[in-house]
Image (cartoon, rainbow, N blue to C red):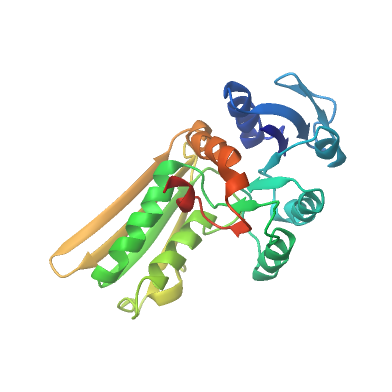
Amino acid sequence: MRVGVNGAVGQMGRAVCAAVTADADLTLVAAVDRHGAGEEINDVVVAEQLQAFADAECDVVVDFTVAESARTTLPWLGMHGIHAVVGTTGFTDDDLVLFETTFGAADGPNCLIAPNFAISAVLMMRFAEMAAPWFDTAEVIELHHMRKIDAPSGTAVKTIERMAAARDTDFVSDPTEIEIYPGARGGAGPRNIRAHSVRMEGMVAHQEVILGAEGQTLTIRQDSYDRSSFMPGVVLACKQIHARPGLVLSLDSYLD
């Protein structure tokens, strides 16, 4: 597979370039980033324009940028018949409708948008979904580095949505009447699942799901201590995306 990386000079982009280069079944053939045009990463010169992906005949492009940029990149990739593996979050429902149209043809190209590529995080979301119907209360705590600008994280949002969809009733409502520090109880998501966001030096990406019922609690914890934790999922997606038709919004099916 011939792979391109969008957002190549960022920390995640560089990690993807290294992971692709290290895999015998993948070849890094293009890198794009308007902030680093002309720089060389893993023997590939970074270009400024998306056209570099078409010129290099990429089979798949990995995008770890921001939603504003990806809204342009993804339709462009679809129009040029290039598969997309996307770790960018923050898309709206309208964005997803557009992407589903762009990547909806039976003969491809295909698109995977995943909130988290760490296998441990994918399993954490699946386990939380399985546990959700069996408990009375639930809270999600996500912890990230100081450069993350959105809250809660895409992983937390997806976790809460999956837990909520797994139930027929709401979790018990928050009993708090007096909140000394505004926001201390986090924000309420679907089915009364509360989300808490921590931004702290020393963190990379971490999440806890805590569920409670009378006499018992269950805590499901996932930790990514380094960006290398996301790379096995990215590499897996690059290798399998040709066989995953249309728009897919989770890495789950790639593990089956």
The answer to whether residue 52 is above or below residue 147 is above
Q: Is residue 95 left or right of residue 135?
A: right
Q: Is residue 103 left or right of residue 38?
A: left
Question: In terms of depth relative to the viewer, which is nearer, 183 or 4?
Answer: 4
Q: Quadrant of residue 159?
A: bottom left
Coordinates of residue 143 in the picture (x, y in percent): 45, 49
Question: In terms of depth relative to the viewer, which is nearer, 79 or 208?
Answer: 79
Can the viewer see residue 197?
A: yes
Coordinates of residue 75 in the picture (x, y in percent): 78, 56
Residue reaching furthest to the front: 107
Can the viewer see residue 179?
A: no
The residue drawn where x is 69% and y is 46% is 83
Question: In terms of depth relative to the viewer, which is nearer, 241 or 232?
Answer: 241
Coordinates of residue 155 in the picture (x, y in percent): 49, 54
The quadrant the N terminus occupies is: top right
The answer to whether residue 150 is above or below residue 136 is above
Q: Quadrant of residue 32?
A: top right
The residue drawn where x is 39% and y is 60% is 140
Residue reaching furthest to the left: 215
The residue drawn where x is 80% and y is 35% is 57
Count the marks. 0
Coordinates of residue 22 in the picture (x, y in percent): 58, 22
